Amino acid sequence: MDKKPVILVIEDEESLRDAIRTKLASSGFAVLSAMTAEEGLEILEFHTPDLVWLDLLLPGMGGFQFLERLRKEDKFKNLPVIIVSVSASPEKVQHAFQLNVVDYIVKSQYRLEDIVKKIDSLLPNPHKK
Amino acid sequence: MALAARSFRRRHAANRMPNRLSIRTQIALVFTVMLFLVVGVRVVSFRIDSKLIKAFEEIVLVDTPRAGILTELKFYARRMEDEALRLSGSVSTSSISDSKERFAVLFKEIREAGRSYAALSQVENAGSFEFSSAVRASAEEAASLVDILSRARSSGRTGDPSYAAAERQLEEERKELLSLVDRRLAAESEARELKSADVASLKRLAITLSVSVLVFVILSFSYLVFFILAKIIRSIKKLNDAAHDIALGDFSKQVHISSSDELGELALSFNAMAKSLDDAEKARRGLETVASERANDLAKKAREFQEAEIAVTNLLEDAKESEENQRRQAASLKRALDEVHKFASIADQERNTYLLLVASIGEGVIAFDLNRKVTLINKVTENILGYGADELVGGDFEARIKFVHKGKKPLEPEFWERVLREKKPVSLSSDISVVTKGGVEIAVSLVVSPVIDAKDNALRGAILTFRDVREERQLEETRVSFISVASHQLRTPLTSMRWFSEMLLAGDAGALSEDQKHFIERIYEGTDRMINLVSLLLQIARVEARRLKVEPVSTDLKHLTNGVALSLKANLDAKSHKVVVSSEPADLPPVPIDQEIFWQVVQNLLSNAIRYSPEQSVISVSMVKKGDLIEYSVKDQGIGIPDDEKSRIFEKFYRAENALKYVPEGSGLGLVLVRSLVEGWGGRIWFESKEGEGTTFTFTLPVAGMERRQGEVSIAI
């Protein structure tokens, strides 16, 4: 049996994390979640996910700082990351793509379902429902 | 003056030629002739008319009745025949007497007819009298014959040859009567023909007369206009031109009118006048020359006189001087001393006043000279910096006073040099702080101005004023962070609500009943509305806090517009809308604009156009270059804005009645943002609308584009 693809979700808002987890799970993904970037880094020490769902506005270490740390290590240089943030500022978008993200999604513009569909198209998932 | 006029007329009287017709006479002649003609024609035609009337009267009153009588007579003749026949067939006494009676009546009638005929004819026609008598005679004859015949019949003597003869004679009489009448008819017919010929020729005459008169009148008027009037007008024009020249000062122009009537005279008078004016002008100029020469002479004499006077006065003065001198010197010395005392005390007072003023200024003041040595400081400076006046004044400016810009080194000497060199004030209000004696950095805002001596415009030094802006900065920081925190805090729960509603609707928590589905859809819509509202509020807050940065980039406006339309494709297709983009000129050059900001404005206006228009409408976007501005318009065929609500359209949260009904979920903030953005780049926005027909929003953009602006954030949320 093929393993389910694993998504690491880094999002500090409880309710949002809840929604994302539920939706991803029901779409056939396995979910690891972290409240802060530091927690995310800790998780990464033990397990490499197939994709990282990253929020930018995080307490403590910010989203970009996390991403920069990630890209420094060879292991994670090409780890797919999608940023899901409230901000639509062009500088942030530019900065994100400079750090080699796969996509930059503005929360208020997208339905959860559509974000999940995007992730679906990026990863092979035999457990799709 | 009067003498001159009289001699003038005498001189020019010889030029008059009384035997040629003056214009007045010509006109009078023409009119007189025309008058006579018209009167003459009237008289003649009057006569013709009378003749015509007479002829018609005759026909009506005489000819026609007469013809009628003749016809009657023929009829009577017929009746005679009938009666004769009846008589020859009557046997009884009663029928014979009846017949006789009838004959009597008949003959009476015939005689009456004859008399009437004569009465109508009057004097004019002798033949009619003859006819009348003949008819009456015939009737008499016939009557007596009838008498004989009836008597014969009554007595039964019809076999007599005299009876047959009488019968034959009666018949003869009748035939005679008939032929009389016929001859008369023929004669009348002839007469009538002659009369009509007469009438016809009279009519022709009348027509000829009218036409000739008309032609003559036209000719006369033509003569009047073309010859006389035209001549007058030409002459007036010549005079006018000459008068114009004279008005401009050229008196040499002469008017040439060759005719010898009033116009010719006028021309001569005019020319004489011009010559007089010319002479007068020359005389005046001569006089002027003479007058100015005299004035010069006088001036020279006056000067000579003055010089002599001065020489004499000098001599007199010299004499008095030596005596006065000593006395005066003593007095003036005393006065000078007094003045000096007075000025000294005023200066002292002023100095004190100024020092007091400077000390009281609520901002820090530091003055330094060209060598950058501190010459003056005030109390506030002492308080802020922590140094005493004695520690700073007289020392080098940079020794103790350190201003720091953007956390870097102290302000470079170049900054001070610039002030001194350009002799203009320079101000720095952001990222500047000063270091106190204790080493603390305090945020300040400062202005340095050159001190220039008003008398010789020379630079004497500079004066610096600064103030503590820590509180202001704090407030700014608070406001800034409030906006960004509000942004995050508001939108996170909204996103959560949205996503959960979405999952419920997708059935991720189990199947929903119709009611449950309906309720959750309402929640979802409400959340969407709130998200839009919050985004708009935040954008508006950013614009109003003047934190917006503007980064202009050369952009093709049509291209950007098409981009916005494309991003709204789903909405356009849903209502089968069509967007038409055009520009004037067709190849509008690119304009330097901040694309985010312009995108916001266009997107807002297009969204509105889509939302408030019915299906299958056309939305027209046009860009027109007008001088140094571009007018950008978005025109829709939607519900329009009612007249009584137009003034409130740009108010925060305001929605027009019809808009509320048509699109209940609108926020009423879109146009507020659009206007703030447009006015931010110095543009103007307005609209034209008719309820039920559509609206056109237009804003202006300078052809030179938007100005670059430093700012903390962009308009994109």
Image (spheres, helix red, strand yellow):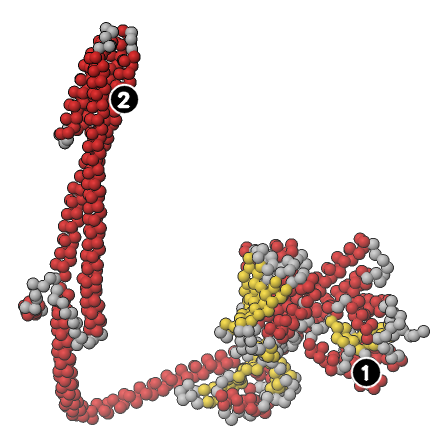
User: What residue did someone put label 1 on?
Assistant: A78
Q: Nearer the viewer, residue B579 or B130?
A: B130
Can you say whether A116 is above or below B517 in the image?
below
Q: Amino acid at mark 1?
A: Asn
For marks 2 and 1, give the CA distance: 148 Å
User: Residue B29 vs residue B380: left or right?
Assistant: left
Q: Nearer the viewer, residue B507 or B125?
A: B125
Can you say whether B479 is above or below B168 in the image?
below
Can you say whether B69 is above or below B95 in the image?
below
The secondary element bearing badge 1 is classed as loop
Residue B76: x and y in percent read: 25, 21
Q: Quadrant of residue B318?
A: bottom left
The secondary element bearing badge 2 is classed as helix
Q: Look at the image and tell me in which quarter the C terminus of chain A lies.
A: bottom right
> The residue marked by circle 1 belongs to what chain?
A
Residue B146: x and y in percent read: 22, 14
Q: Quadrant of residue B220?
A: bottom left
Q: Nearer the viewer, residue B392 or B623?
A: B623
User: What residue did someone put label 2 on?
Assistant: B78
Q: Residue at x 61, y 64 (%)?
A: B619
- Residue B649 visible? The answer is no
Residue B398: x and y in percent read: 58, 91
Q: Are marks 2 and 1 on the same chain?
A: no
